[in-house]
Structures are given as C-alpha cells and as structure tokens.
Image: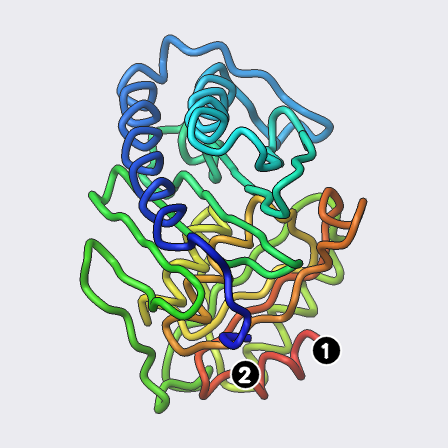
Amino acid sequence: MTSHVVPGLEARLALAETIGREAGAMALDFFARRETLIIETKRDPQDLVSIADREVENLIRDRIAEAYPEDGVLGEEYGLVPGRSGFTWAVDPIDGTSPFVNGMPNWCVSIALVHAGIPVVGVIAAPCHGELYAAALGLGARLNGKALTLDGSRTIRNHVTGLGANNYVKPAFVGQMVESLLEAGGTFMRNGSGALMLAYVAAGRLVGYYEPYMHAWDCLAGYCLVQEAGGWYLPFPTEGESLTRGSIVLAAAPGAVEDLRKLAGV
C-alpha cells in the first residue's frame, strides 16, 4: 500500500492535526457544559446527537473548505459533499456521543483523508486524555509526536481485544463474537468509541478491534493509524455509494491478525 504516492500529503496531514486540535478544544468546551446541551436521539434511542456534534462538524468542514475547497467531505452529521480533487475527508465530530453526554472521557474527534480509495491521513484527537494521534501513508504514526510501533509478540491470548456493536447487529451475533473470542483464549473491552479503540490498537493498548458494522467516518482515521504503526486492517469499501454505507471493521497488531480474521470470518 505504501507504494501509493500521494501529492501534498504532508500539508494535508499538518492541516488535519491543526483541525484536530481546534475541533478537540471546541468539543471539550461543550463537554464541560454538557448538562446544558439539548440531546436528541437518532434512529435508535441509544444513538445520541447534540448541538456539539453539529458545531464541531461545521468547524471541521469550514477549515477544510478554506484550505482545500476542491476536496470532498463526508461527515456523520451532514453527509457527503463530493469534491473534484480526488481527495475526500471522512470526519466524525464526536465519536462516542453517549460517553460524551454522560460525562465519560471515552470520546474523540476523528478526521481521515481518502485518496484512490485508501485512507492516507488519520488524525484522532482525544481531548479528555490530552492525546492527539496522527498518521499519514508512508510517514508513520505518532501519539503526541512520539512514534508508534507495534509489538509483534502481542496476541489475543496475552493482550486485550476491543469489540464494538450497535443496533445494526443482532444480539445473538454479538454474544457469539464474545463467546468465540473468550473460547480462543482472549478477553475484551468496549469503551463506547470505535474510533478511539482503533487508535488504541495503533498505540499498542489493544491488540485488535472488531466491529461487525461501522461507518467510514468512524474507522478510516484509525485504519491509517494502525497501518502506519505496523498493523493490519480489513479494507473498507470506498467506491461510489459504498463510502456512505456501513461495513465490517477489523484491525489488528501483527500477532493477532490470523486469530481475529478467523473470529470475524474474513
């Protein structure tokens, strides 16, 4: 994948980091005032949205439009605005809205850039933790400026796997996911933010992450981070309309790839 050469990638990575910090600061300010926010539900009563999600996404879109008006942008709150440059940003203003509105720190801002169907920039800001994860194709992955490199000796049996699910996934299927992982000698955690758990895979805090149905704006930044840290991910369908639809998400450190592919049946 790294043979894929992308013009001007360093500048777009720098922009994504700057936007990540600014958007993270705005979201953190909303988080401090969360009890005053009007919370709405989406299709599922567990799927929450607030003015914070919309305002943070507007900020991200505005900053991208100022710097790269020809780029496309796909965001969770306002959908896809196609571009003409061959670049499309996929952003989730607050991934983990439920933790966010309920006063837990496990939420983040996720900003990815896609070129020729591949995530080539990934930035995840976790403001409650004071962390900024950043990666670009062929340029490595970093956490607060420190290079991330995955440990090949970590497996599902000596480390923790992240699992995620939502109401697109049948309860029995979720139960089977957990059972299969435990039977294989693994253990799991879930923190309410798939994007943040993917960042944790890149940082070596989790050995892998599996969610049967996830959207592009939730996973593509994390995918770039995991790959650049030396891990593996299952490619997300990005052609045409498929970019706006959900798909299976799987990412792993080198020592967990085989086990987690078996678990997910891919």
**Rendered residue at 51%/51% (across/down):** 194
* Quadrant (top left, top right, bottom left, bottom right) of the N terminus: bottom right
Q: Position of residue 98 (x, y in %)?
A: 48, 33
Look at the numbered disc 2 and give the secondary structure of its residue.
helix
Tell me: residue 177, above or below residue 191.
below
* Of callouts 1 and 2, the N-terminal one: 2
**Rendered residue at 74%/52% (across/down):** 169
Residue named by callout 1 = 266
Neighbor class of circle 2 (other Cα within 10 Å; few <14, some 14-19, many 20+) is many
Position of 106 with respect to 163 (left or right) is left
Instruction: Tell me the tag on residue 8.
Output: none
Look at the numbered disc 1 and give the secondary structure of its residue.
loop
Q: Residue furthest right?
A: 241
Position of 127 with respect to 41 (left or right) is left
Q: How is the image coloured?
A: rainbow
Tell me: residue 178, above or below residue 214.
below
Q: Which picture quadrant has residue 146?
A: bottom left
* Quadrant (top left, top right, bottom left, bottom right) of the C terminus: bottom right
Neighbor class of circle 1 (other Cα within 10 Å; few <14, some 14-19, many 20+) is few
Residue named by callout 2 = 257
Q: Amino acid at mark 2?
A: Val
